[in-house]
Amino acid sequence: MPLLVVYLGQVRGLGTTIAGLVVAFTAVGSLVLFMVVGTAGDKYGPKPVLMGGLVVEAIAVFLLSQVTTSTAAFGVAALMAIGGSMIWPSQSALIGRVSDPGERERVFGIQFMLLNLGLGIGGLVSAVLVRHTSVSTFQLLYILDALTYLLYLAVVVFALTGIGVGPEAVGKDHDSEGIGGFREVLQDRLLQRVLVLAVVLLMSGYGALEVGMPVFITVVNHASVSWVGVEYAVNTFTIVSAQLWILRMIKGRSRSYLMLTVAVIWAMSWVLTGTSLLVPAHASVLLLVVACGVFALGEAVWAPVAPSLVNDLAPPRLRARYNSTIALVWSLSSIIGPGIAGIMLGAGLYWAWILVLIAGCALAGLLAVGLHRRLSPVLDGRVQSPASGPAASE
């Protein structure tokens, strides 16, 4: 998918502006659909929604290989938005349903590690297959990519029989009554705090990284685009190699303070990025690669902590809706972060952009400290939950 802008803009000749708008349109589409997906997941179970999303995404990615016009590109982007909106929250809700609170951080952490291993493998396959001047190599890439969604679908159908279908069973220790629907979800004050913290942190992290690092490497330092691949390889390798160690380190520690730790690590990454403006070009690129590796350590802390907290907050009957709010956060950060980066970096405001990101990390850190005062020891991860389901309330 990182090659999508190159494929649409240059290989298909639609232009960089159209390609960028198509990518942004995908994020906006996900923003619109999160309520529908969450409601369907709670009503029918996360597994059917996940299966439907895999089918839609397989079709959409295959159709990417056939796109020749901007209208077709936006149509395929709409399908991709639908499929992605169905896959990611449903997958998280399914994991939350089948894992006990005491195991969730480890399960989500291992999932994130394997996700990055898959990203690394996909990147290597892409590097081997595609040729910048060959439409057919990109077509082959997207056809193979579509088949991987069908492979995942086969795993879900045949390996997860009888799991994740229908509303989640409510145990005797859980209240089955409530306002219901997204009204109840959005009235959860603890969830509100978690979501605000997540938006601020992610737009100062992932959302900025996707645009900022390639610009710093290729535009600011005039380095080869291959260094962007090296940068993401270092990021991926760091996560895969460090995730299990980090899972051992964070076990039994405060989730809110771990989010503070993420904010500090990402701020350090942006300090290194800013420092690259002060050193010679060859050293600058290496410093940016190091910054991306440091950023990955923060990712490896964030990935197990945030979804585990959201799933512990969620009543079983609303688990899919709660997980769909994470997709909302990702969509918002994917719009705001790159938008700020595009405007400021396009105007040459490199130092100002770095300061904005450090300020965002600082604000996220303050929000994490405020969250710590409101989470019970069980929800905060300081005390092991004796049972599954929501452990405490505000």
Image (spheres, grey):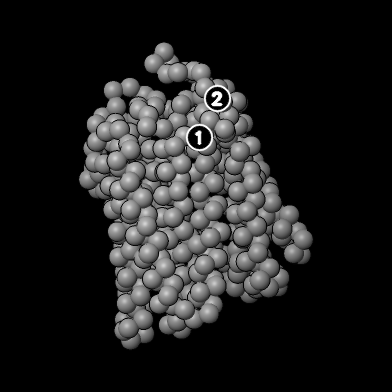
* 112 relative to 73 in the view: left or right: left
List x then y, in percent, for residue 321.
54, 34
* Label 1, residues with CA under 10 Å away: few <14, some 14-19, many ≥20: few
Residue 230 is drawn in which quadrant? bottom left
List x then y, in percent, for residue 100.
36, 27
Q: Which mark is residue 129?
A: none
Quadrant location of the C terminus in the rendered image? top left
- Image position of 54 with respect to 359: above or below: above
Foreground of the two, 38 or 196: 196
Q: How many marks?
A: 2
Identify the residue position indicated by label 2 in the image.
179
Q: Are marks 1 and 2 in contact (CB under 8 Å)?
A: yes
Q: Secondary structure at mark 1?
A: loop
- Image position of 304 with respect to 359: above or below: above
- What residue type is disc 1 on? Gln
List x then y, in percent, for residue 196.
45, 48
Residue in view at x 33 percent, y 63 percent: 267
List x then y, in percent, for residue 286.
33, 76
Residue in view at x 54 percent, y 77 percent: 346
* 55 relative to 329 in the view: left or right: right
Mark 1 or mark 2: name the one nearer the start of the chain. Answer: 2
Foreground of the two, 76 or 278: 278
- Image position of 269 with respect to 174: above or below: below
- Image position of 358 with respect to 346: above or below: above
Identify the residue position indicated by label 1 in the image.
187
Q: Marks 1 and 2, Cα distance to the nearest angstrom?
A: 10 Å
- What residue type is disc 2 on? Ile
Residue in view at x 42 percent, y 43 percent: 193
